[in-house]
Amino acid sequence: MTVKGALARFFDGLPGRFRSAKLEQVLRGYRRSAHDAELRHALAATTEGEEERLESEAWRRTLEED
């Protein structure tokens, strides 16, 4: 499989020597962020009221879209 275009430029701009290592680094960061978001969501669900929950959901959707 080859990496082309904007994706290749993205990986080439990251520090490191090999694209495969860079991809692994990006995936680890994504997993870490996703796990953190899940924990924050679980915590918020136990401590916030309905209005706060709706606002948090709106922010979560906005962040996921970006």
Image: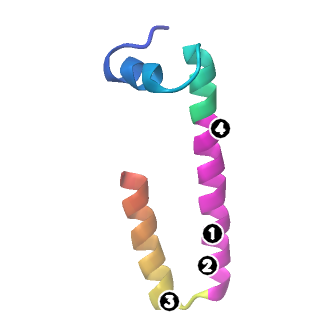
Along the polypeptide, which appears first: circle 4 or circle 3? 4
- The reply to whether the C-beta atoms of the residues labelled 4 and 2 are less than 8 Å apart is no
Residue at mark 4 to residue at mark 1: CA–CA distance = 18 Å
The residue located at (50%, 89%) in the rendering is 50
Amino acid type of disc 1? Arg
- Of badges 3 and 1, nearer the viewer stands 1
**Where is mark 1, residue-wise?**
40
Secondary structure under tag 1 reads helix
Residue 34, placed above or below residue 18: below
Label 2 residue SS: helix
Can you tell which of label 4 and label 3 is closer to the viewer?
Answer: 4
Marks 3 and 1, how far apart at CA: 16 Å
Position above or below: 26 against 49: above
Mark toward the start of the polypeptide (4 vs 1)? 4
x, y percent for residue 37: 59, 61
**Which residue in the protein does label 2 denote?**
44
Q: How many marks?
A: 4
- Mark 2 or mark 3: whose residue is earlier in sequence: 2
Secondary structure that dominates the magenta span: helix
- Measured as percent of width and height from the top left, residue 9 is found at 37, 20
Q: Which mark is residue 50?
A: 3
Q: Amino acid at mark 4?
A: Arg
Which three-letter amino acid code belongs to the residue tagged 2?
A: Ala
The answer to whether residue 62 is left or right of residue 52 is left
Point out the residue furthest to the top here. 1
Specify the segment rendered in magenta: 27-47
C-alpha span from label 2 to label 1: 6 Å
Report the residue marked by disc 4. 28
Q: Residues within 10 Å of mark 4 (few under 14, many from 20)?
A: few
**Contact between labelled residues 1 and 2, with CB atoms less than 8 Å apart:** yes
Ranked by sequence position, the earlier of labels 3 and 1 is: 1
At mark 3, the secondary structure is helix
